Structure formats: C-alpha cells, structure tokens
Amino acid sequence: MIAAICLEDRNGLLFNGRRLSRDRAQQEDLMTVCGAGRLWISPFSAPLFAPWQERLVVAEDFLCRAGPGAVCFVEDRPLLPVLDRLEALILYRWNRAYPADVYLDLDPAVEGFVMEQQSEFSGTSHPRITREIYRRGGGYGKT
C-alpha cells in the first residue's frame, strides 16, 4: 500500500478535527500518480475528490482493505498500525506552518524509507507544493 499525506512544516495533519488546508492542484497531481488505479480514502476525505468519484474506494477501514500497490490518501488517522503494509509514502508539503494538534506518527527515515524523488509544483491555493516520494530502503523498519 502507498500512503499519500499532506503536511504543514512541522508534519501537522489536522487542527481541531479539521484538515489544515486543501489544494485542487495537489488533488489533480495525486489522481495522476494513481494512473488508471483507484484512490482509497476515508469518508472524511471523500468530498475533496468528488470530481473523481468513479475512481474512489471510500470506506472507514480503507487502510485495512487496501492491497499491495493501492494508493491511499490519509489525512485523519495514524499510519503506525499499518506500517508493516506500507510500501511507499507520498508526502505533499504545503511549505507553510499551520496550527496543528494531530501530527504524522512516523518518521520515514527512522522506519526504513528512502527518498526516491522530490519535485515542486504551483498549487491553486499554495504558491509552492513539494511532493516527496519515499520507498522502503534496504532495511525493513527499525533495526
């Protein structure tokens, strides 16, 4: 499974039960990354991807149900419980600091992920969005 996550500068995900931000260009980029595949998401995230409704798998337990290679957009739950199933991470960085009270619960480098690619693009609400792609490195998890 591949987890895609949007983060502010301190790896924040949510504040007071709300997403920190959203961006149409980021959503389009993620759908391009999915290719012909489906995007697995929670009901919380479904409204963001309404234009691609026919390509979505919406389920409360989407992280448990998604199989190898499935792209999952994660913004409202921890990843450590599914760490052993994560093949890759796609981190979208807003390049801004927002108030947050829920943070990404893992450090890619500590968990054995290696950055494979980094690119930037202009968003519709953010002048610069950084996309980082991490894959499992030589080790598998902590040593």
Image (cartoon, grey):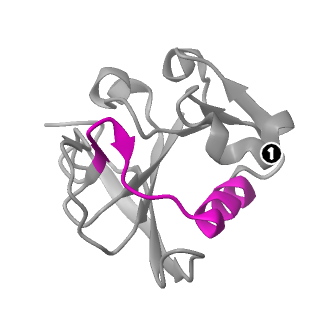
Label 1 neighbour load within 10 Å: few <14, some 14-19, many 20+:
some
Residue 11 is left or right of residue 121, and the answer is left
Q: Position of residue 43 (x, y in %)?
A: 58, 26
Secondary structure beneath label 1: helix
Which range of residues does the magenta coloring cover? 13-33
Residue 78 is left or right of residue 51, and the answer is left
Residue at horizontal 51 percent and vertical 58 percent from the top: 22
Residue at horizontal 48 percent and vertical 77 percent from the top: 126
Residue 85 is left or right of residue 111, and the answer is right
Q: Quadrant of the N terminus?
A: top right
Q: Which residue is mark 1?
A: 52
| Figure check: 123 above or below 78 | below
Q: Quadrant of the C terminus?
A: top left
Question: Is residue 17 shown in magenta?
Answer: yes
Q: Position of residue 3 (x, y in %)?
A: 48, 41
| Residue 69 seen | no
Q: Position of residue 113 (x, y in %)?
A: 33, 50
Res 71 → quadrant: top right
Name the residue type under label 1.
Trp
Residue at horizontal 35 percent and vertical 51 percent from the top: 137
Question: Is residue 31 shown in magenta?
Answer: yes
| Residue 7 seen | yes
Most foreground residue, 6 or 3 = 6
